[in-house]
Image (cartoon, grey):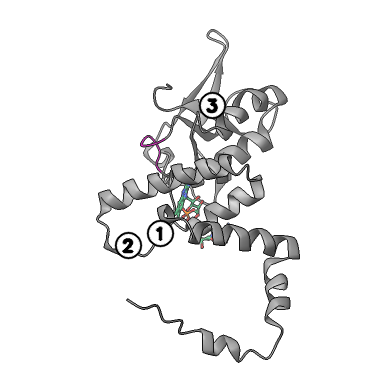
């Protein structure tokens, strides 16, 4: 079927400088350049096609989303894209997948809250996607009200470990995207129990499925 650009005529009637507006909209000339290059990259790659999306069944759509996410990762490495470019490329994929949580929440949680030692250990694995992470903040009874989280992390001096416990139905971790289906690891937000003098809430990084 021949493609028709219904907007071209309207766009041609704009009474302002469209190119200058694009820079304002993107935030800077650099941001526009990155956005433009990544948009072209996605549009020109048949693996990233979107025109069949509404025709696919649930299972096929799921598989196709995984295929695209894996292909995106491959292209990011082949082309040695920067973090900024990679994030823009994923934006243009426009298909929420298991890697969105990995890149959008899990990696930033390690970068923002991990010690140097933890970052050194986990970030290379996360960047190579040898671990894939999600995050579990929300609970059945606690969304925006993070102060109210009921899941606790209690230090057990006997085993030198933290015991993570959701004691009630309302404390069940909820809406953790793709949890257990595609993830190896999870950042879990808990309140400290008993005697802890540091920040009240803390992320715990924990395996949820067998690694390897
Ligand atoms: C698509 C999707 C994916 C998600 N993925 C994840 C995930 O991977 N991991 C995870 O942990 N969570 C995830 N969440 C959950 C998300 O973090 C929660 O939806 C969010 O924390 C808001 O909580 P809630 O939906 O229970 O809304 P509520 O907290 O019940 O809020 C309802 C409304 O009340 C307003 N409100 C709340 N508190 C106040 C206040 N004190 N004053 C004024 N107004 C207030 C809010 O703005 C909102 O309009 C996901 C949610 C969605 C929709």
- Calculate the distance from the C-alpha at mark 2 to the C-alpha at mark 1: 7 Å
Pointer 1 residue Cβ closer than 8 Å to ligand 1: no
- Residues under labels 3 and 1: Cα distance? 44 Å
Viewed as shown, does residue 12 lie left or right of 177?
A: right
59 lies above or below 34: above
Q: Mark 2 or mark 3, which has the lower sequence index? A: 2
User: Mark 2 vs ligand 1: CB under 8 Å?
Assistant: no
Q: Is residue 104 above or below residue 26?
A: above
Task: Answer left or right for 42 relative to 56.
Answer: right
Instruction: Identify residue for label 1.
Output: 49
Relative to 117, say whether 18 is above or below: below
Residue plotted at (54% across, 22% down): 154
Query: Visible in this render: residue 28?
Result: no
Q: Residue furthest top?
A: 158
Seen from the viewer's position, the closer of residues 32 and 116 is: 32
Most foreground residue, 198 or 52: 52
Q: Position of residue 99 (x, y in %)?
A: 48, 43
Is mark 2 in CB contact (under 8 Å) with mark 1? yes
Say whether residue 68 is visible. Answer: yes
Marker disc for residue 153: 3
Pointer 3 local density, CA inside 10 Å: few below 14, some 14–19, many at least 20: many
Q: Position of residue 189 (x, y in %)?
A: 54, 36
Q: Secondary structure at mark 3?
A: strand
């Amino acid at each position: 079927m021949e493609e028709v650009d219904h907007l071209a005529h309207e766009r041609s009637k704009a009474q302002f400088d469209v190119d200058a507006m694009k820079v304002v909209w993107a935030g800077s000339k650099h941001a526009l350049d990155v956005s433009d290059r990544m948009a072209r990259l996605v549009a020109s790659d048949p693996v990233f096609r979107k025109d069949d999306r509404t025709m696919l069944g649930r299972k096929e759509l799921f598989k196709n989303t995984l295929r695209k996410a894996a292909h995106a990762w491959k292209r990011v490495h082949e082309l040695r894209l920067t973090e900024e470019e990679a994030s823009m490329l994923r934006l243009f994929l426009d298909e929420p997948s298991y890697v969105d949580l990995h890149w959008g929440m899990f990696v930033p949680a390690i970068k923002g809250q991990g010690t140097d030692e933890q970052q050194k250990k986990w970030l290379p694995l996360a960047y190579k996607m040898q671990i894939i992470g999600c995050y579990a903040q929300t609970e059945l009874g606690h969304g925006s009200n993070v102060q109210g989280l009921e899941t606790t992390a209690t230090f057990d001096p006997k085993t030198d470990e933290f015991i993570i416990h959701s004691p009630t139905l309302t404390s069940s971790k909820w809406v953790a995207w793709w949890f257990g289906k595609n993830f190896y690891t999870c950042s879990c937000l808990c309140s400290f129990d008993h005697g802890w003098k540091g920040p009240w809430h803390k992320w715990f990084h924990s395996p949820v499925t067998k690694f390897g």
